[in-house]
Image (cartoon, grey):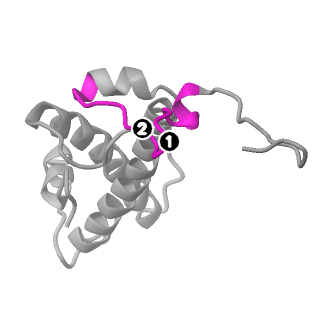
Amino acid sequence: MGTYASASDVVTRLPNRRISASSSPSTTEIGAWIDEAEARLHGALRAGGLPTTGFGAEAILALKGIVVDYAEGRTRQAFAQTAGDDSQDGRQLLADFKEALDSISHEGEKWAEILDVAVLSTQTGFKSLAKSKQPTRVFTREEQF
């Protein structure tokens, strides 16, 4: 079961589809796609120097939308494959999900504002290099650090 979303959130977006524990795709498969999306989202949050817990209600709704986009996209593709249809259904949702993750991981300060959280610092007190895009200091053997 996901932190931000559940299979019922995807089912709600697809009112003309019968989705159950025995359908193809099933609510169990949709739950697995939600877990997959959340794991990838957490990776992007960490890469952007952001926390993965402690979000307020508005932030959770924003993150839920990103996660459900992915799960709905996978669900739509599964329905198309089951019907033998090579349609584009669901692909744009998956592209939107990837774009959101790229934005989160590269624009941490912007997403900190959107999610109303602080940008995390590393143990040394410097902001995440993934977010700040500052060059890494390389020491030579002659230098002492």
Which quadrant of the structure image shows residue 100? top left
What's the residue at 22%, 43% (across, down)? 64
- Residue 37, image quadrant: bottom left
User: Residue 124 vs residue 63: left or right?
Assistant: right
Q: Which tag is nearer the camera, tag 2 or tag 1?
A: 1
Asked if residue 87 is positioned above or below residue 58 in the image, the reply reads below
Residue 116 highlighted magenta (yes or no): yes
Residue at 78% across, 44% down: 144
Question: Which residue corresponds to mark 2?
Answer: 121
Query: Mostly what secondary structure, the magenta segment?
Result: loop
Q: Amino acid at mark 2?
A: Ser
- Circle on res. 124: 1
Which secondary structure lies at badge 2? loop
Q: Does the segment drawn in magenta span residue 12?
A: no
Percent across and percent down for residue 52 are: 30, 48
Residue closest to the far left: 57
Check the image and report above or below for 54 versus 136.
below
| Residue 41 in the image, given as x and y percentages of width and height | 39, 48
Disc 1 marks a residue whose amino acid type is Thr
Q: Residues within 10 Å of mark 1 (few under 14, many from 20)?
A: few
Residue 2 position, x and y percent, is 22, 61
- Relative to 106, residue 14 above or below: below
For the point 46% across and 39% down, the residue is: 101
Residue contact between numbered discs 2 and 1, judged by CB atoms under 8 Å: yes
Measure the alpha-carbon separation of dots 2 and 1.
Answer: 8 Å
